[in-house]
Structure formats: C-alpha cells, structure tokens
Amino acid sequence: MGIEKHIQVTGTSTVSWKDAIVHTIEEVAKTITYITSVKIIEQRAKVTGNKMTEYYVDLDIVFMVEAK
C-alpha cells in the first residue's frame, strides 16, 4: 500500500505560465523524489504598463512517501 503526500508550492516566471510550471516542478524534483502528479490550482499574472510581466502558478504536487 502506498501513501501519497501533497504539498502546495508557488512558482514564477517572466516568460509564461508554462515556463513557471516546468521550472517549479524541476526545482521541487531536486529535493523530493517519487513525484506522481501535479495539479494546477491557480494561475495569476502581474501587469505593468498594460503588459503581463510576471506569471505565477500555484501547484499541488503529489509524491509517494517512502516506506522504511
């Protein structure tokens, strides 16, 4: 029987929401193993001078808890 754990993280990018998602998952994967899924909770953007200048994503990251 496996046990899953969920954590919520926020990532940012100056390029796009997709870039924010990809880089956030890459960073989380450096310290958490056995990631099984990701759910996009929310996407937001900072607007400066009528242009989107920063993209924010809130992610629910799911990973398996290692049995000892």
Image: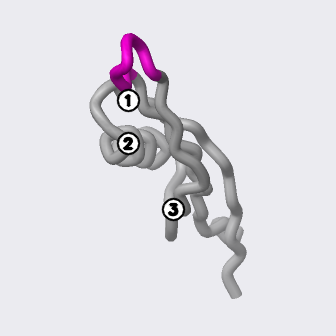
Instruction: Using residue 34 as the reference point, say whether residue 6 is left or right of it.
Output: right
Residue type, label 1: Ser
The residue that label 2 is drawn on is 17
Q: Secondary structure at mark 1?
A: strand
- The mark found on residue 13 in the picture is 1
- CB within 8 Å, label 1 to label 3: no
Instruction: Judge by depth and name the residue closer to the eye, 8 or 17.
Output: 17
- CB within 8 Å, label 2 to label 1: yes
What residue occupies the far front of the structure in this picture?
50
Q: Is residue 15 magenta?
A: no
Q: CA distance from mark 2 to mark 1?
A: 7 Å
Question: Can you give x and y, in whole percent of width and height, for residue 5 in the image?
Answer: 70, 63
Q: Secondary structure at mark 2?
A: helix
The mark closer to the camera, 1 or 3, is 1
Badge 3 density bin: few <14, some 14–19, many ≥20, Cα 10 Å: some
- CB within 8 Å, label 3 to label 2: no
What residue occupies the far top of the structure in this picture?
49
**Upstream in sequence: badge 1 or badge 3:** 1
The residue that label 3 is drawn on is 38
